[in-house]
Amino acid sequence: MFLLFLSSLVASAQGPATESQVKAAYLYNFGKFVTWPAVRANSDSFGICVLGKNPFGNVLESTVAGESMGGKKIAVKKISNVQEAAASCSVLFISSSEERRLDAILAAAQHMNLLTVSDIHDFADRGGVIGLVSEGDRIRFEVNLNAAGRCHLTLSSELLKVAVRVIGTVPGS
Amino acid sequence: MAEKRTRSISGRLMMMNILVSGIALLLACAGFFTYDQITFRQSLVRTLSAQAQIIASNSVSAILFNDPQAATTTLSALKSFSNISSAGILRSDGKPLAQYSAAGQKPLVTLPQLPKGGGEAHWFGTKHLLLIRQIVSQGKSIGLVYLRADLHEINQRLKRYATITISVLLISLLAALLVSGAFRKSVAQPIVQLANTAQEVSREKDYSVRASTIADNEEVRVLVTSFNQMLQEIQQRDSELQQAHDKLEQRVSDRTRELVSANKELEAFSYSVSHDLRGPLDAINGFAYLMLKQYSANLDPQGRNLIEQIRSGGKRMTELIDDLLNLSRITSSVMHSAKVDLSTIARSIMEELCRTAPERKVQFTTSENEEAFGDPHLLQIVMENLLRNSWKYTSHHQEAHIEFGHTRAEGKTVFFVKDDGSGFDPRWADRLFHPFQRLHSSVEFPGNGIGLATVRRIIQRHGGEVWAQGEIEKGATFYFTLNLPDKNV
């Protein structure tokens, strides 16, 4: 028997992740629990777009490097206008720098079936699909099912299970 | 003895039954148990694996979004499985995200490493089964789930099996007892009966007994039948032997009767001869006497001497005939047994003898109260003959000594009459007791040789023995024993 102490496993692990690293990983992981309408499924890459001032530096790129989503390569794009997302984005991170134009952005994203994610305060309440919130030193998230429905996105119950708050109900349930 | 044998045969049958059924049952139980253990372990692993799969797929999001609460909720579903003692979800860096442990149990702190390439592995311990499964998302391992199941249930099953085995063993023991009871009837009982019959035969010597042939068992029936045949043969031989014996007995009694009648005829003949001889003899004696009395003046001395010779011869012949008649009377007379004081008899005889020859110096000693059991008249004759004998054969000595007494030899009383007279040649000791056999000439000692023969006849009629010891000029001793059953004592 090869018994290893968990403490030794901890020792071999990397140092504590930064807030940016956690958020970057979340952006990537959300994709695993969301089903997009067929239109989106046709594109040959899985795009994660950052709108506005990029808070990740190059952390996002390094996080998704070599990863894939449903057999598609993951591509990170930085855009300054929501219209740029239409072509190749599946996940749209809205930087806090865009808070003033949020309603317009969300309205646009709804037609593009984008999974909108942001750490803007009360993002989910304001019509975003997933809003990142800080809970102590942990990063958690809220889900707005009504917003997801408007974007024709199906969120896995697994995702809802770990959400700190779920707004609205699953359509049909 | 018979009881003991009964127990041993039926006991052995019972032991056989118990042993056979016990061994068969133990083997069967061991087989069932082994099979059950294997299948139970397999199903346990399958169940645990399914549970691990469910937990793994349900905890992907919790790991990805670092949500211990959700993971804990997932694990808490295990509460309904009482056999799971602890479980845990570990992140890929090895840190536990959530742990679960049943009441009174501790979560695991050490985990064995999964073999390379294996998504799942399990280890059986003495009390626990540990199963580890990788949690995979998008083809990548993002963590581990482990489940530890208590093997308490298996041990419980083991106990249940042992209980069932023991109770079935007890029941089979009871069944064996019953079966052996039935066997005893069909196998042991005929053998026991046979043994009893054999014992009865040897004890009672009754060969007409037969063993019962009611036996289901072929071998036992053969045994009983051949035993009975053997008895039949023995009985037949026994009766043949008895017949031969009876025939022999018949022949002996026939011969005895013939012999007795011949003997009686002989005695009657000798008696009548002796009796009839007396008539002519009395005539010879009487006429010789008359001739001597009336015609002695006419005879010369030589004639007178010749007539004296005739008278002397006649007198001797009369005595001889008297003795012969006495002898035959002794043989045929009826015996009346009584206690007899031989000392008194001996003394009175000696007194009478001394009176007839007062000039002789004879010392007589006798011990007092020499009592014997027999016919008083016949014993009187014995004592008279023996003492007169001693008196006669000491007559040539100046002084003589005669003794009567007894010694003991081989537990019997041996009476004796001892003298220091002329004695006899010991070579002819046996001839002393034959009638008309004399060791001395009648000139030396008068007599006709009937006395000791009479003594022997009387002693023989008393079931005793008589014998003599002596040497020439050194005296003689006559011994006799009496062996009549003493009814009065």
Image: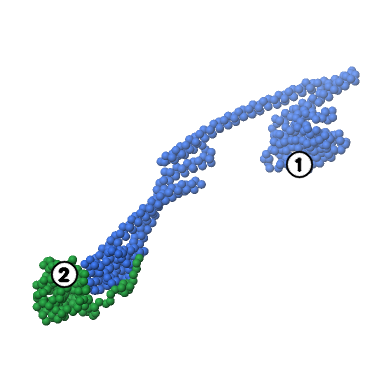
Chain colours: A green, B blue
* B318 up-or-down from B182: above or below: above
Q: Decide if residue B377 is in sight here.
A: no
Q: Distance between the residues labelled 2 and 1?
A: 155 Å
Estimate the x, y position of residue B200 in percent, counting from the top left: 51, 41
- State the residue at coordinates (25%, 73%): B68
Residue identified by numbered label 1: B406
Quadrant (top left/top right/bottom left/bottom right) for the C terminus of chain B: top right
Q: Nearer the viewer, residue B60 or A83?
A: A83
Q: What amino acid does circle 2 point to?
A: Phe
B234 left or right, relative to B297: left
Q: Which of B210 and B10 is in front in this view?
A: B10
Q: Which of B56 and A37 is in front in this view?
A: A37
Estimate the x, y position of residue A117 in percent, counting from the top left: 16, 75
* B462 up-or-down from B117: above or below: above
- State the residue at coordinates (25%, 65%): B53
Q: Residues within 10 Å of mark 1 (few under 14, many from 20)?
A: some
Q: What amino acid does circle 1 point to?
A: His
Q: Mark 1 lies on which chain?
A: B
- State the residue at coordinates (71%, 42%): B410
- State the residue at coordinates (24%, 65%): B54
B252 left or right, relative to B393: left
Please state the total of marks drawn on the protein image: 2
Residue B383, image quadrant: top right
* B277 up-or-down from A17: above or below: above
**Which element is circle 2 on?**
strand
Residue A96, image quadrant: bottom left
Q: Decide if residue B206 is in sight here.
A: yes
Q: Which chain carries label 2?
A: A
